[in-house]
Image (cartoon, rainbow, N blue to C red):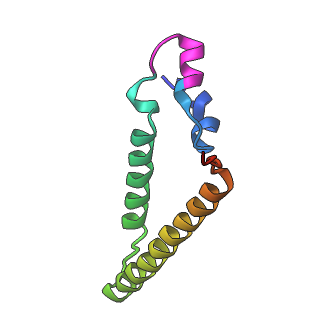
Amino acid sequence: MFSFLKYLPLILKFKNVSDAYEAEKGGDKPFWLTRRFIGAVIASIGAVAAYLGGITISPEILDEITKSLETVMATGVTLYGLIMAIVGMLTKKKVEVK
């Protein structure tokens, strides 16, 4: 019943559980060992804990979070593009012109 506990260290490190499960059991992992399911469970636990703890978020705080996320996302996309350009320049192959 609690066989998933032995995979908990892999789950907490965001590692791929399917390789370990397949090596041990010889088949595909069950749905409850998927990252999607585990993420949904963790998000649900967080929501329940916030509700039971009486945590409320005002509209002003949500507005600030939204503005911050927009800035972080724009910065992330810009940095990703910059890194891709640098990697492309470093790994480009020189073409001989005949």
Please provide percent x and percent y for residue 57: 37, 79
Please provide percent x and percent y for residue 13: 63, 44
Residue found at x 60% / y 23%: 20
Q: Residue furthest front?
A: 98
Highlighted range, magenta: 19-28
Viewer-proximal residue among 94 and 68: 94
Marker count (numbered): 0
Residue found at x 38% / y 58%: 48
Viewer-proximal residue among 61 and 72: 72
Please provide percent x and percent y for residue 25: 54, 12
Q: Residue furthest top?
A: 26
Whether residue 43 is situated above or below residue 6 in the rendered picture: below
**With 75 as the anchor, is 49 left or right in this view?**
left
Q: Residue furthest left?
A: 59
Whether residue 86 is situated above or below residue 58 in the rendered picture: above
Whether residue 65 is situated above or below residue 36 in the rendered picture: below
Q: Residue furthest bottom?
A: 60
Residue 84, picture quadrant = bottom right
Whether residue 31 is situated above or below residue 88 in the rendered picture: above
Please, what is the dominant secondary structure of the magenta stretch?
helix
Viewer-proximal residue among 3 and 72: 72
Please provide percent x and percent y for residue 98: 60, 45
Viewer-proximal residue among 54 and 12: 12
**With 92 as the anchor, is 53 left or right in this view?**
left
Residue 93 within the segment the image draws in magenta: no
Residue 64, picture quadrant = bottom left
Residue 47, picture quadrant = bottom left
